[in-house]
Image (cartoon, grey):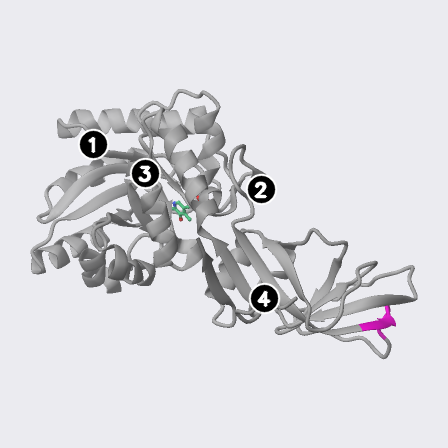
Amino acid sequence: MNTGGGAPRLEINLSKIHHNARFLVDRLAVLGISVTGMTKAVLGSPFIAKTMLNAGVSSLGDSRLSNIKEMHKTDAGAQFILTRSPMLSQVDDVVTYADISFNTEIDTIVALSAAAKNVGKKHGIVLMVELGDLREGIMPDDVEDIVRKVLRLPNIKFMGLGANLACRNGVMPDTNNMQVLSELADSIDSITGSTMEIVSGGNSSNLEWALNGAEVGRINNLRIGEAILLGVDPLNRKPVDGLNCDAFTLVAEIIEAKIKPSQPWGDIGQSAFDNVTAITGQNNIFQILLALGEQDIDPNGLSSSLDINILGSSSDHLILDGRKCDLSIGEELSFCVNYSALVRSMTSPFVVKIMQK
Ligand SMILES: *Cc1c(COP(=O)(O)O)cnc(C)c1O
């Protein structure tokens, strides 16, 4: 049953990703909202970036400059946005590889201005506003003062405002916090005397707000990663209607299959990952070992359509209760991944990535 390609591997169905991106681009376009395709969960994969661009995203966003550099090699014409505040130590590369960066610190923007001047470029700045989730963002009352300073800097173009919710504390995007951002955009426009280009309301967790008939106000951009890649709403991890949830399949190979006692014996200390779980009520189980471990995936982020149960993991092994399944060594098992397992498998050099058309 081994289909080649090596295991463990992540099979990536690009047409499913294309469908998801296109679906969201179309649905949001009706509302006047453009989509920035977020590539950070897939390590800036040029194949996936290209797929998103073909599906109509207006720009590519990533939190890591190294991913943006990678994408430059194949998609040099695209607009690239660095969505994590730049480190002061990286401003030279930021202005070289990113057209726009999201920022919250005036000293960093001053350094970006100097770096952009050095290379004769104009660098776009979106100022992130704190709306309650308490990750990055300028407190709303302080935005005006920073905008005035930004406008005075050479080689810097003030592009607009952005916000990010539901990442640290799970604060949900809603009519109230989106209206705060819209009103702030109006008041900043009245100071600058022009209409800002970008009012970026948030990430995949904004979809429920956007697609359920809310007044979108000034919001004209969303940055979408998880919903394009995995088809789910990060607020509840439920499938979004119309999207594919199975664009990524993780495949691993069985290296041991034995009837074993369900209970360990001997004195019990800590295990490698401090995750001992006791199973009760069974004498023997059909225990399966996969050549897949914590270095490759997040074991809690895997799901299977087979009647199997994940019992434990170590760096390089995943231990399953094979139940009624008739499984033997050399066979492969397939899993769907959640965001955490996707990020870990994309990041692991041990997991082969297979792009499928
Ligand atoms: C990760 C991130 C996104 C994309 O989030 P998804 O939930 O994957 O859509 C958007 N904006 C910022 C600032 C991010 O850090």
Looking at marks 1 and 2 on the same chain, the residue that comes earlier in the sequence is marked by 1
Confirm if mark 3 falls within 8 A of ligand 1: yes
Disc with the residue nearer the chain's start (3 vs 2): 3
Q: Which range is magenta?
A: 258-264
> Within 10 angstroms of label 4, few (less than 14), some, or many (20 or more) residues?
few
Find out whether the residues at labels 1 and 3 contact each other: C-beta distance under 8 Å.
no
Q: Which residue is mark 1?
A: 196
Q: How many marks?
A: 4
Q: Nearer the viewer, mark 4 or mark 3?
A: 4
**Residue 3 shows which numbered tag?**
4
State which mark lies toward you, 4 or 1: 4
Residue 352 is left or right of residue 33, and the answer is: right
User: What whole-number distance in Å separates the C-alpha atoms at marks 1 and 2?
Assistant: 33 Å
The CB of the residue at mark 4 lies under 8 Å from ligand 1: no
Magenta stretch encompasses residue 269 = no
Of callouts 4 and 1, the N-terminal one: 4
Q: Which residue is mark 3?
A: 162
Q: What residue is shown at x 85% (from left), y 79% (from top)?
A: 266
Which of discs 4 and 2 lies nearer the camera? The answer is 4
**Disc number lying in front (1 or 2):** 2
SS class, disc 3: strand
Q: CA distance from mark 4 to mark 1?
A: 52 Å
Location of mark 2 (residue): 237
- The amino acid sitting under disc 4 is Thr
Residue 216 visible here:
yes
Q: CA distance from mark 3 to mark 2?
A: 24 Å
Name the residue rendered at 84%, 78% in the picture.
267
Residue 142 as seen in the image, left or right of residue 312? left
Q: Within 10 angstroms of label 2, few (less than 14), some, or many (20 or more) residues?
A: some
Q: Amino acid at mark 1?
A: Met
Question: Whole-percent x and y of residue 233?
Answer: 53, 39
